[in-house]
Each structure stands twice: as C-alpha cells, then as structure tokens.
Amino acid sequence: MAGRTTLKLILVSGTALACAMPHLAMAQAQTTREAATQTGAATPTSGASLSGDTAAESDNGRDILVTGSRIKQDPNDSALPLQIITTQELQRNGIVSPEQLISFLTSNGSGADNLASNSDVVTAERRGNNGASFANLRGQGPAATLVLLNGRRVAAQGTTGSAVDVNQIPFQAIDRVEVLKDGASAIYGTDALAGVINFITKKDYKGFGASAYTDITERGDSPIYRLSAIAGYGDLDDQGFNVMGTVGYSWIAPLQAKTRDFVDTFQHDRGLGVDTRGTPFATIVNLAGTSFPTSGSFPLIPGTTQRATGGLNILRLPGQPGCASILDQGDYDTQVWAAPGNGLACTFDTGKNVYLQQKLETLTYLGRAVKRFGHHDIVLEVTGSRADSAKRFSPVQITPNTSTQNYRYKRIVGVNDAAFDNLIARVNSVYPGLLNQNSSFAYRWRCVECGERELTTRTTTFRGALNAEGPLFGDWDYRTGVSYAQSQSSSLLGTGYYFRGTNDNGTLDGSPGLIPALNSGAINPFLFAGQTQSAAGLAALQAASAQGVRLYGGKYSVKQVDGSVAGSLFRLPAGEVKIAAGVDFRREEYSFTGDQRATQRVIIAAPFDNGNVLDGIHRDIKAAYAEILIPVLPGLEVSAAGRIDDYTGFGTTTNPKVSVKFRPFKPIMFRGSYNTAFRVPTFNQIFNPVVDSVYTGADFADPKNCPGGKINEASGCPSLSRAINIRSGGNPNLGPETAKEFSVGGVFEPSRHFSASVDYWSIHRENTIQVLALQTLFANYTLFADRFIRDAGGVLQTVDQSYSNAGTTRTRGIDFTARVNFDLGRGQIAAGIDGTYLTKKDEQVNAAATVIDELGVYSLAADLGLRWKYNAYVGYSNGPWTLALTQVFRDGYKNQVLPGIAAGTFNPPNDVDRVANYILYNVSAGYTLAPNFKLAFGVKNLFDTDPPFAISYDSNNGSGSSWEPRVADPRGRSFTVLTEFKF
C-alpha cells in the first residue's frame, strides 16, 4: 500500500509542478542547504547556541551548541539523531501553531494529546486538558518528553501538572525547532526519557516585521487566524546590545461535528452503535417505587420472548413514530452491544453533538535584551502567554436513583395531565392495561433544552530568565542562568450545567434545581417531533443553571539555577579531547484547587475534582553532569555523558549515555548510542486521593465467571453496566520507572545533492507508571484478582484502577530521512521524506502476564501504535516563485471491536476489521514581491479527504464516534493565505 501511495505522490507531483498556479498554498523556501544534509536544514548561523543566546561560533564557523549536548558540534555531523525544522518547512506545510507541528512529526506518537482528542467527555487521567496540547515523542507519554524554550525549561500546564502545554510557546518568534529523537536524561534529567523538543527563538533582530495568516475551510467554517509582529533595535556586534520583542495572537474557531458527514455513530453495517439510553425523548427505566420497580418488571418486546430489561422508549413501540423521528436519535443496537434486553430502547448520537475542534484564543509574547561586555553576553528574556479555550460537548444526561436524583414522571392535574394521558394511551395500545392514571415512571433523559455542556478555561504562563555566557580561557567557555517559570489555569462551568437541588440524603436543598423542576411536571422529557418545551419548563431550567461556577484551578512553577563550562582538555593525534560539565538545581511546585464555594451545592455531571486538591506541594532536584568527546581515530569519535540527579523523596539516580560516530570516508557516517533513563511519578500520580465513581459502560461481564470479562447473556454473562464502581487516584507507594535505550544508524551523503539517514532505535521501560486499562484488568483477571473488590457474598463492587508500577513496555522502530536537490533550468527541484516505521510496540503488565501486542492495534486511550508514518515533499523554486507538494501518510490499524462482534453473536455485513490508511496532500505556492514583502497561498488536504472510518466509541464515557482524532484532521480542504513584510 505504501508503494502505491508513493507512486501516487510522484504522479501527482509531476502534474502539480507542470500545472502549478499562483493561487496555491504556502510559500516554500528550500528546506535544505546547497549541500544536502541529514537534518534537512541549513546549519543555523548568527551565533546560534543551545539556549538561543548569542554565543560565538567555533573556529570552523559551523560548530554550535545543539540540543542534546553541551559540546559544540556541527548539527549535520552529529552522532545524535537530531531533526532541525526551519521556518521555511513550517510555512510549506501551513503549520502555524506548536500543536500542528507536534502532530506533523512522524517521531511523535498518536496519543490523545491534542484539542480534537479532548473535545468530549474524558477520564480523570486527562483531567484539566481543556485547551491544552502535549508532545509525545515515541509514544511514551507527554511526561516523558522534555519541552524546552531556548534550551531551558518551561512550566508544566497548571491543572494537569505533568507536562508542558505547547500552546504556550511564542510560535511567532520561532527561528527553528530542534527535535532530539533520542533519550537525553544524561544531559537534561529524567523527563527527557523519550527525547527533547527545543523551540529556539529569533535573536539579535533589527527592524520591524509583521505577518497575517488565515486558514479557512472550503465549507467556510472553523477558520484559523494568526497575527504577529516583531521589532528589534541595536546591533550586537557593532553597538554591543540588542533589544527585541514579539507578540502574536491566534484564534481557532470551533468546529461542530454536525457539519461533517463522516461523523455518524449509527453504523450498524460496520459494527458501530451508541451505548446510551439517555435520549432527548426519554427512555423509561426501572426504579424502586415506580410502576417498573425492577428491570424484570418490564413487558416482553413485541414478537419475542425477550423481556425489555433495558427499559422502554415509547417511540420504539409498534405504531409509534420511531426513535429516528427525533434529531440524532436511533434504535439501540442490541446486536452490536450484545444486549437483547435493550430492544425497546433508543439511543442518542453523542459523537455528533460535540465540537471536533475547540475554540481557542491565544496571546503570546517574548521580550529579549542582550548586552555585550567584551566577549561576555548578559541576556534577559521574558516570555508569557494567555490562552482562553471553550470546550463544548453533548447535552447532559440525567439518570435517576433512589437517593440524590429520585425523580419520576407522574400525572399532575393542570400541569402535565394531557401529555401524561397521551403517553399512557400509547403504551396501553401495545400492552393493554399496563399503565393507568396513577402510574409513575423513572426515565433517563438527554436534556437538549439544557444546551451543550461547556467548560471555559484560561491558562496564563510566565517565564523570566537571566542568563550569561562567554569565554574563559583558550577555547573554554561558560554558561549560567537563573529562571522562574509558572503556568496557572482556571476552569469555569459554562452553559449546560445545572444545580441538582437536593442534598445527599435526597431532601430538597431549598434552592432552584433540576430534580425539583423535573418532579414539578413543568418540564416535559417526552416531547414528540415538532413539540417544544413550555415557557414554565424553560424558566425552571434557567433558574437552575450553574453557569459561571468555578470548576477547579491549578498552578505549576519551576525555579532553576544552572551553570556549565566546556572546552578542550588536550590533543590526541585524531583531534582535541573536549569536555563539558555542569550543575543544575531546580524546585518544582504544584497546587490544585477544587470547588472553593462556601456552600457547595451539587451540580449534575460537573467534573469537579475536589478529591484531588493539593495544597502547595514541591520537590527539589539537585543534579550534576559531565560530557566528554574523544576523537579515537581519524573519523572515529566516542562521546560519554553522565548525570547524577537527587530527587526529593526518591533519592539519587545516575544515568549514563555513550555515543559513537564513525566516518570511514566522507560520504558515509555510522552512529550509535546507548543510555539509561529514570522518571519519577508526577505529583498527581503520587498524591491524588483515591475516589470511587460509578462505571457507566456496558462492555464487561464479571471476569470471575466469564473469561476475559466478555459479555454473553445466553451463557449467563450479562453486562456489569451501572453495577460497579471504578476506583482511581494516586499511589503514595509508587516508585520510579526506568528505561534502557539504544540507537544505531548511518548517514549517506554521496554528493552535495543527496543525503539519507537510517536509525534503528529501541526503548525498554520497566516499572512503568500507568493506569491499567480496564480491558487489561479484565483480560488478566487471575493476575489482578486483588483489584476486583467484592462484598461478603462475592458480588463484584469495585475495580481498582489507581496508578501502579505495572510491568514493562518495549517500543522499537526505524527512522528514515532523505533529501535531494538538483538544478532544473533556471530553478531548482528539492524533495525529501521523513518517516518512522515501528517494528515493535508491546506491553507486559507483569512477568507472568501475556505480552500485549499494541503495534497497529486500536487502544482506547493510550498511544496508537501506527506502524508507518511519513511526510514527503517535492518543491520547485525559480527566482521569486516557490512551489511545493507535500504528502502526509499515516498507516491504518486494527479496528476496535464492540461486545457483540467480540462475542461472536453478530457479524456485520461490511468488513471493519482494519482502519484504512490516512493520506493527505498539501500544495503550496509563494511569491516574493520585494526583498521585504512576501505572499503565500495554499491548499491543505487538496483532495478533501475525510478521516477513515474508525470505531473510537468509549462506552464508559459515552464519547468518541466514527473517526479517530488522534490521527486525522476533521476540517477537510482548507485554503491558506500568508502575508509577511519587514523593514
């Protein structure tokens, strides 16, 4: 399949280049220097350094500080697998935000770390991710990727407290991005287990520049806008100082799922259905004290011997309008969910009632001042951001119980008697005499009139750094700095949330609430098509609204002091032995606040997190590291590095790294490395209290009697739906996880027109810190029987899903990079490819457990192990014109299977075993009107390709749908325009 897509790329490329028109895509300056390089980027100039500061280059004019080392070297002759991404490459692909860049990297995993993946109901594991996006190199999780700004740390996102929200990066100021695709714990610390992404900003800028960018879909919805400006004054070399500042504003408009046809969770023929009986036209369910006190009290489904144990929706009875008569409703798919008792229930397409793209407004800024004293530079840098997001998703579902939410529908004369009598008559037309005027019934209801649920979040960040660097003696130099960074977030409830109106014992709390409003009869949950809620009902809802209540907030801060020196020790026949050494001290602090109201009235379905309140905890990290480079023979270099970290509460750890570079002759270089890593738990993973929540899924049976917890009612394995609790929270006994990593590869550069690199890499983690998936716990019941908590009679009550050090993971793959360029007439052709091919991704939850193969297989919430990902491009430049075509390829994978198919009781007519490959084409063109003025135009997703069908539905949360947001872009074809000028 990959071969056919490559051939398609070549054919389309030729057509595009022959017929290219100036109204197509983003500008494309060459992403390679004249001589092709392994990184695909020209060596940064103007004194680039690890920190982005203005350190002088070494004598050969090419050696600089690069990410992953403190010893200066040529980034295109490095033993490290380092990818350098220039602004030209960003423009070619229409990338205008850190989130877009992260998703574009083939070395980044396919986890639920972007705005689209967090646009619905999510588990506690992703609490507080509203408006946030995270890096996830090698699919090892956001906490295992170190994100730097100019070589130094930024604070983790305020509410999650575990990883850096990349949306805080001042992207308008970026000069380049360095991605180290290798473990770097020996230089940076334990959170660099999977690699490092270093955003390096412009520096020593003189003049004024501005840019404006738009990205608008063909359908005219969900536009993306960006405005930015930069100004600087002072020549560092001539005047001894420079001051500069940048500011950027971006706006992402929301995208409604209803506007995209590929979002459809009612696809019976493909084995996809919705597991929810909470519908806009309510479904009658059992409740003690009503006309249906137990599930067994419901009648038989007409024409069958099956009792309607899952409830009764009047629309589905013979002679009635049908479930689909109400917008976004459908029949409950009993075959897909292996639940024949739900044959009189309706369902609601929750996937069609979310926003595929969250609304996000971001303001970022950077200020930088450099003063040179002789050869010493003092740098003051201030950066910050403010991000406002609005996450909107499906209307709230109301579910009854006998205590806190004891509501029922009954006849109230003068209020709802006509509507009640109509319902009774419709039921009795099928089941004569079943109900009468004295009947009452509980119901599950999706309150569409309540409006979409909304969570608004504001996150502000700030970082101030004072750095100094310069020469010492000979070729020795120093770098030192002190910095403070913080991220603070606060989330509020928007529309769609309502006070319950009852106390924990079920009594009324004396204030307007949804439960007393339902019991008043003013609200009608049984509205047929064309009917609307009464004025009294709408007024009752409005009075119960909880809009504006603070949900939670958090703050994470990092104080850091560091210093290092580097230089030559002595000369060997093959060259200078170089060494670097440094020390690093930092304090990380985290606090999380929940509901701070003096009177905490209950709000239905509000995701409060009061159990996880953490009041100002902190840890200190003291570290020292050293690095040495030894030229053993001409063309053979060995580097060794080591770091000692002392963590509060975890003691001391030492992590070495050894790398080798061998160039037997100029066109070929071999390289390899080995290192260990160590990652301590996050604050939440340790300190969050344990809490129990009701499991709302319908996809497991009791694994004690039913192998693997698979549902099969015919064999006595009914669903555990709504019968158990899930226990989540921190674990104070967690230990650190460790890793062993290696990579080996080579670079081939036969001429200045071509280069290619191949690197094989491996990450083996042990004692991994994770929340074991419910599927894993149920499938390995004999190994985790202690996590299934039962009452005295042996009935399952709770499943413990709190954090644990669970087993090992193994991830291996091959990175490919190639660049080629050659002259064609008066212009130049440039082409390239960056790809990652996974060869292994598996997990073993303990030594006795079966190895779980996660390569190319659906996972519910973790990283999707796509076997093959690549980005390929071909471009043509001729004077002021630039043209380019890019292909983005993401491999398919084995689809999720819902209970009916898993049990073998239903075989869908269409084969849905595998999710198809996802392939996009972006085309671009740009024209430089004058040396300081450029226009660029682009088309993203040239062929308007929809995301492939994928079963991403999550029964527990009622979230997900028919496509995979961890892989695909839901916007469709869009058109981009970029204008830049400077003077």
Image (cartoon, rainbow, N blue to C red):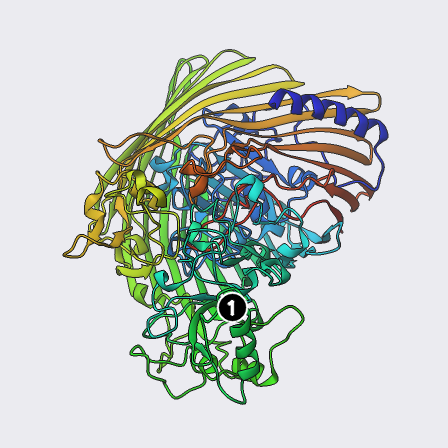
Give coordinates of residue 55: x percent, y percent: 51, 41
Is 17 left or right of 205, judged from the image as shown? right
Q: Please tell me how crowded label 1 is: few (under 14), some (14-19), or many (20+) other residues with Cα within 10 Å.
A: many
Q: Is residue 59 above or below residue 185?
A: above
147 relative position to 594: left or right: right
Most foreground residue, 526 or 549: 526
Q: Quadrant of residue 574?
A: top left
Q: Residue furthest front?
A: 432
Q: Position of residue 944 (x, y in %)?
A: 72, 41
Q: Name the residue beneath numbered marker 1.
A: 427
Residue at the far top in the pictured view: 664
Along the viewing direction, whichever of 392 and 169 lies nearer the viewer: 392
Residue at 52%, 60% in the rendered image: 384
Amino acid type of the residue that numbered disc 1 sits on in the rendered structure: Val
Can residue 944 be seen from the camera position used here? yes
Q: Left or right: where does residue 661 sit relative to residue 692?
A: right
* Figure disc tally: 1
Q: Secondary structure at mark 1?
A: helix
Q: Quadrant of residue 879?
A: top right
The answer to whether residue 357 of the structure is visible from this angle is no
**Going by the picture, which residue comes out furthest to the left?**
792
Rendered position, 599 above or below 394: below
803 sits to left or right of 266: left
Rendered location of residue 64, percent (x, y): 51, 33
Identify which residue is drawn at 29% across, 48% down: 681
Quarter that holds the N terminus: top right
